[in-house]
Image (tube, helix red, strand yellow):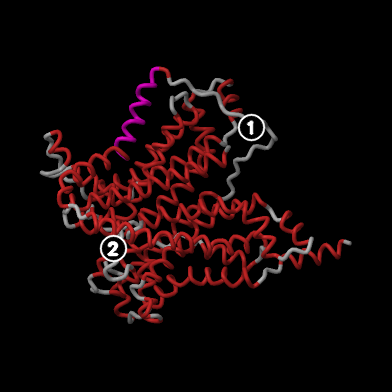
Amino acid sequence: MSASISRQGARRSRAPLVLILPALAVGLAACLPVVYLILHALEADPAQLAAILIRPRNLTLLGNTLKLVVVVLGLATLVALPMAWLVTRSDLRHKGLVTFLMALPLAVPGYVMAYALLGLSGYYGFARHWFGLSLPSLHGLWGAGLALALYTFPYLFLNLRTAFLGMDPALEETAQSLGRTRAAIFRQILLPQLWPALLGAWIVVGLYVIGDFGAVSLMRYDVFSSAIFTQYAGAFDRVYAAWLSLMLMALTGAALLAQHVLSRNRRFARTGTGTARRSRPVPLGRWRHAAGGFVALVALASLGLPLMVLGHWMRLGLPDMNLLHLGRTALGSLATAVPAAVLAVALALPVALLTLRHPGPLATMIDRLAYLGYATPGLAFALALVFFALRTAPFLYQSLALLILAYAIHFLALALVPLRLALMQIGSRQEETARSLGISPARAFAKVVWPRLRRPAVASGLLVFIMVVKELPIAHLLAPTGWRTLAMNVFGRTSEGMMAEAAPFALAIILFAAFFVCLILKYEGATAR
């Protein structure tokens, strides 16, 4: 009997080709950018390579990039950590509305936030026109840092909020009964338990900042990503651009390694079974007005400021607005984002099924490679695909097919996470029972698994759609000639000082992304109920 069961388990673990082949193709596609960057970089002769590696500018770019990461993480944490505590541990009113307002800045891309900060100042800017204040133009490290922090703090907020809600309140109550102050409880009990969520969110935000191109370019702050684009677009030294891309990827790898080292051997689960319950809200008392002011200030800076500045420039540019061009550009973004989202979900599904239903060395390797595309900064990813198309498939160069494929591979990890979680919750017993009754594997999947997987698949697609609509570096390098997305129009016009002309495109991005952020939040609320 046991031998029979063992043989059945062995048969179940043998993955069918219908899963192996597409999953393997996904893994190879994710490797492609790294391989082609290395091949192109190795074209340098020894003398050229030595000159590239010892350039003093490399250290300047590294220092600027690291400073930007520190500034963004610092500012975002100063906003997200107290905000997450307020909506989970205090008696703050209207917590649902506050949570919604803190998540909605995800709809405002970093380059649109930079546009808003730039549009605030200047002779014709929002502040001078409405309040008579001539604010100095915000450029450089602090301009780029503020723009990116106002965009990325929701990632930290949502992670920390989840961590607070998952904590056992008995630990705090016990410490309080022993006479510990609230500051000591936060420092000694809450903060260590927040560490995994904080570190995970830091790595997501840090990787985004390392690869950001739009905000740093508009703020004229020289980092790796802006230097890569300058070298490639100006055709000054494309071998140097490849080496800068590899340096950027090495910095990404170092960040991932640091996360692994800092998070290993840390356990935060309680040893007893315990009872799931919420903690008693901490009364804000005389701090209630300060907390309300803090929420209002953050909402005003992250949502109100972009909308007010956009409204100001829209008013100035409304008479000359080309609605036909705006409509064509919006349709162009849709024509890119919809197929990219569908393809990303279609590619993520066999990877998730292979890794969960047929675990093994091959499945583990493909699973790791699937995350490589997202870990590769967008500009380096796009540059590698440019080299690939020019060398091996010239017919793909500057084609819509290559742009859609690039988006699907780059954002594959975002589609993979919800699908993996859903498949883990569904399990395989019902599907195996259906197959034991003589139903084919494909029909068993369609009848048993897919109906329960449909909602997570839609959520995955919505998330990829939002990211594609807002994405700039990949579109800037891979878009076909004459093909313009909303993001490209915002960046192109803002970089030339055409603030009024850029406003309709920026507003369209916010409206698109905000609508789908609302859909995702509604979906999460429905599944929670």
For this rendering, which residue is in front, 243 or 341? 341
Instruction: Give the residue drawn at x 51%, y 28%.
Output: 185
User: Where on the picture, by quarter, is residue 333?
Assistant: bottom left
Q: Is residue 302 above or below residue 56?
A: above
Position of the C terminus, as image quadrant, is: top right
- Is 409 left, or right, of 65 in this rendering? right
Q: Give the amino acid type for the residue marked by disc 2 in the picture.
A: Arg
Q: CA distance from mark 2 to mark 1?
A: 51 Å
In the rendered structure, does residue 407 fall within the stretch colored magenta? no
Residue, far right: 1
**Most common secondary structure along the magenta stretch:** helix
Residue 176 placement (x, y as % from top left)? 55, 22
For this rendering, which residue is in front, 272 or 482? 482
Residue, far top: 286
Q: Which mark is on residue 276?
A: 1
Question: Which region is colored magenta?
Answer: 286-302
Q: Which mark is on residue 484?
A: 2
Instruction: Give the residue drawn at x 19%, y 42%.
Output: 312
- The secondary element bearing badge 1 is classed as loop
For this rendering, which residue is in front, 231 or 51? 231
Residue 287 placement (x, y as % from top left)? 38, 21
Position of the N terminus, as image quadrant, is: bottom right
